[in-house]
Amino acid sequence: MTTTTAVVVGLGSIGARHARVLRELGLRVATVSRREGGDYGSIAQAVAAAHPDYVVIATETARHADNLQELGQTGFHGKVLVEKPLFATPAPPPKYPFHVSVGYNLRFHPVMTALAERLRGREVITVGAYVGQDIRDWRPGRDHRATASATADAGGGVLRDLSHELDYLLWLFGPWHRVAALGGASGARDIDVDDHLDLLLDMQRAPSVHVHMDYLDRQGIRRIRVNVDDDTIEADLVGSRLTVNGKATQIPSERDQSYRDMHVAAMHGASPVCSLPEALGVMHLIDASERALRTKTWVSP
């Protein structure tokens, strides 16, 4: 691996994880945080001192655009990975002097890889995706109501926080033709962002797609179920198994494997890492889904 130095911007739970995974890959890692614990207090300081080849932006979603602009002003020309989602709103980005990928690591989950291989070249009839986890269990020891996930100004709410589902649906079945939405803020977790949402999508490779996402599920589930002509295929990303017509196959998946594989791909600009245009496509679908929810109508691109 030619990349030897990385800078991780943001030291929340996901930033700390990125830093650890990169160190385990053998990189020298410097960190940037406005709070205590970071090696540097600003992106400019870190780039000037550490001379990184690779930068990870892992701050709150609402800060991503400013962070990328600040990085561009330093003259950095390497590879960048931005945590998902790319932005809080779907504004077209300026031309960056560096290559941007976005952190949709589920593309690299071994079960998702197996599902994509199973679906290759096949006619898809229906797709059902379900993701749910109680937001109170996400970050043990922290008040869930004070996290970025629960704060609209920070880019919280299920559509952005759980946008992995939108990314992999677009990756596997897109583009989308129209979307309808139900859901909103139930108040059950004492937060004012949307904590549950159901989308119905008409997509190019799948005429009937349903996706459910919530902050409520006490069990914690992440599954996608697909009907093709003669097979029903279910990918269980929590249980790490692929089930075809009721017959389950365990697919080993170590907790950080998808992050390691994503970083290696991002550092080399390699498939199937999520590109800047693809991540903007997710943002446009989020925006359309919110309009569908507000207007109670189908929304097209």
Image (tube, rainbow, N blue to C red):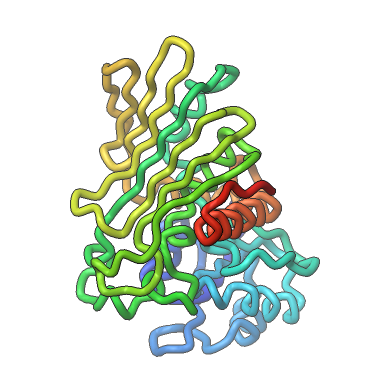
Q: Residue at image x 52%, y 54%?
A: 296
Q: Residue furthest front?
A: 296
**Image location (x, y in percent) of residue 42:** 57, 87
Does residue 2 appear anywhere in the picture? no
Note whether 252 is above or below 142 in the view shown. above
Q: For residue 49, which quarter of the picture?
A: bottom right
- Foreground: 197 or 77? 197
Does residue 264 appear anywhere in the picture? yes
**Image location (x, y in percent) of residue 218:** 19, 54
- Quick check: 253 left or right of 181? left
Q: Number of labelled discs?
A: 0
Note whether 36 is above or below 178 in the view shown. below
Q: Residue at image x 39%, y 35%?
A: 224
Note whether 212 is above or below 216 in the view shown. above
Q: Residue at image x 58%, y 41%?
A: 170
Q: Residue furthest top?
A: 230
**Image location (x, y in percent) of residue 137:** 22, 63
**Image location (x, y in percent) of residue 300:** 66, 47
- Quick check: 203 left or right of 165? right
- Quick check: 152 left or right of 94? left
Q: For residue 144, which quarter of the picture?
A: bottom left
- Foreground: 143 or 285? 285
- Foreground: 91 or 244? 91
Q: Residue at image x 34%, y 18%?
A: 244
- Quick check: 79 left or right of 160? right
